[in-house]
Image (spheres, grey):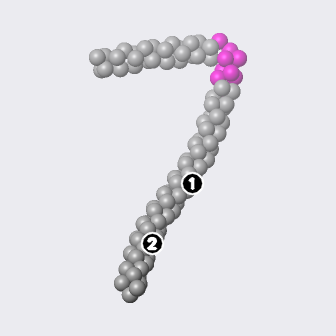
Amino acid sequence: MADWDRGHGSVENMLDAENRRMAENLATKVSRLKSLAYDIDREAEDQNDYLDNMDSNFLSATGLLTGSVKRFSTMVRSGKDHRRLLCYVSGGLILGFFLLYYLVSRIQS
């Protein structure tokens, strides 16, 4: 029986060592998951901040566009001189667009 007790003690030591190894492995995996969860949380906070800033930028752009539309409407409703100026500006913008389109297409070819 003495041999069996020695063998039994060695099996317990082997199982104990295996349990410790598996516990360390589990602890490593848990710390890796904790690190990933922290990184995901940081990324989500950064994205929320980015979206908040984008929202305020859109609001300021909306304000600028609203003011521009009001000024444009006022200019269209005013006298002939402003209408002539509006036609010149519109024609210049259209001509500039086509010139820019032509130059970009020549550069890409």
Local crowd size for mark 2, using a 10 Å CA cut-off: few (<14), some (14–19), many (≥20)? few
Query: Which quadrant holds residue 59?
Result: top right
Foreground: 24 or 73? 24
Q: Earlier in the sequence, mark 2 or mark 1?
A: 2
Which image quarter is the C terminus in? Answer: top left
For residue 35, say whether it is visible.
no
Foreground: 59 or 8? 8
Amino acid on which disc 2 is placed: Asn
Query: Mark on residue 19?
Result: 2
Mark 1 — residue? 45
Answer whether labels 2 and 1 touch (C-beta < 8 Å).
Answer: no
Q: Position of residue 52 (x, y in %)?
A: 61, 47
Residue 39, compared with residue 26, is above or below; it is: above
Residue 33, compared with residue 86, is above or below; it is: below
Relative horizontal placement of residue 19, taking residue 105 as reference (left or right)? right
Which contiguous range is marked in magenta? 71-81
User: Whole-Å distance between the Cαs marked 2 and 1?
Assistant: 39 Å
Q: Secondary structure at mark 1?
A: helix
